[in-house]
Amino acid sequence: MATDSLVIHEIYRSIQGETSFSGKACTLVRLSGCNLRCRWCDTPQAFHGGERLPRAEVLRRALALGTQLVLVTGGEPLLQPAALPLLRDLCDAGRSVLLETSGERDISQVDPRVHRIVDMKAPGSGECAQNRLANLELLGERDQLKLVLADRADYEWARALIVRTNVAARAAEVLLSPVHGELDPKDLVAWSLSDALPVRIQLQLHKYIWGRDAQGV
């Protein structure tokens, strides 16, 4: 059955590099496959391939690494039907569970115990038209909206989205991230302070520790 197995790119223990959980010990379960091609994607190696494993084995390997925090990511994890029961299994095992997903997949069926990190795509990504804006109405006090920005035009798009939807009143966090090596973080900080946006500025911590091209860390 489709819910009995997943195609896995990697499972490893590291620290969480983004979101309000940044810096915490975390097991990352990276699923293979993605239907988007964002210009600045830093995990194209997960587009294809991977190892098909029974869902029970994925759970066993994730729990064996011993961290309280577990992130299910991709690729795009919600492309695989078994991702939903895997998230439930991890919650049932007493873990704090994060899901990182694009803004394109419907998040309504995700277990309510999961912290949903929704990475809506700015125009500079080349995939803005794929955003499922209805997901913004589903975000709650456990969830976070992530917006990765390449330039001033992306920032202005993000500002308009935040103001128009009032998403900061529903989600736990609205995260603004500069594209690593493209947008100067100092500019993003200055813009958000000038506009008094209700956001958290974040950098990709793992890239500053291990370098922008490191994998599996």
Image: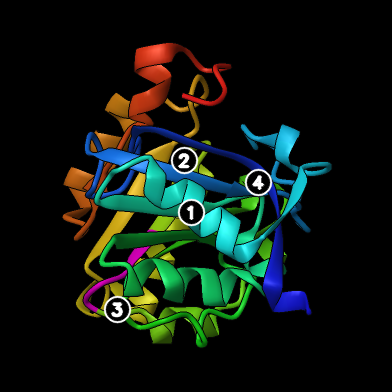
**Disc 4 marks which amino acid?**
Ser
Task: List x then y, in percent, for residue 210.
Answer: 42, 13
Q: Around disc 4, counting alpha carbons within 10 Å, would you say few (fewer than 14), some (14 to 19), or many (20 or more)?
A: many
Q: Around disc 2, counting alpha carbons within 10 Å, would you say few (fewer than 14), some (14 to 19), or many (20 or more)?
A: few
Q: Around disc 1, counting alpha carbons within 10 Å, would you say few (fewer than 14), some (14 to 19), or many (20 or more)?
A: few
Per the image, label 2 sits on a secondary structure element best described as helix
Frontmost residue, 116 versus 172 = 116
| Residue 87 shown left or right of residue 139 in the figure | right
Residue 166 is marked as: 3
Frontmost residue, 124 versus 66 = 66
Q: Can residue 121 be seen from the camera position used here?
A: no
Q: Can residue 105 be seen from the camera position used here?
A: yes
Per the image, label 3 sits on a secondary structure element best described as loop
For marks 4 and 3, the one nearer the N-term is 4
Residue where numbered disc 2 is placed: 152
Q: Are marks 1 and 3 in contact (CB under 8 Å)?
A: no
Task: List x then y, in percent, for residue 147.
Answer: 44, 53
Q: Residue at x 68, y 48 (%)?
A: 8
Per the image, label 1 sits on a secondary structure element best described as helix
User: Which tag is nearer the camera, tag 1 or tag 3?
Assistant: 1
**Disc 1 marks which amino acid?**
Arg
Q: Residue at x 59, y 69 (%)?
A: 83
Range of residues picked out in magenta: 141-145
Residue where numbered disc 1 is placed: 60
For marks 1 and 2, the one nearer the N-term is 1
Q: Around disc 3, counting alpha carbons within 10 Å, would you say few (fewer than 14), some (14 to 19), or many (20 or more)?
A: some
**Disc 3 marks which amino acid?**
Asn
Compute the Cα span from label 1 to label 2. 44 Å
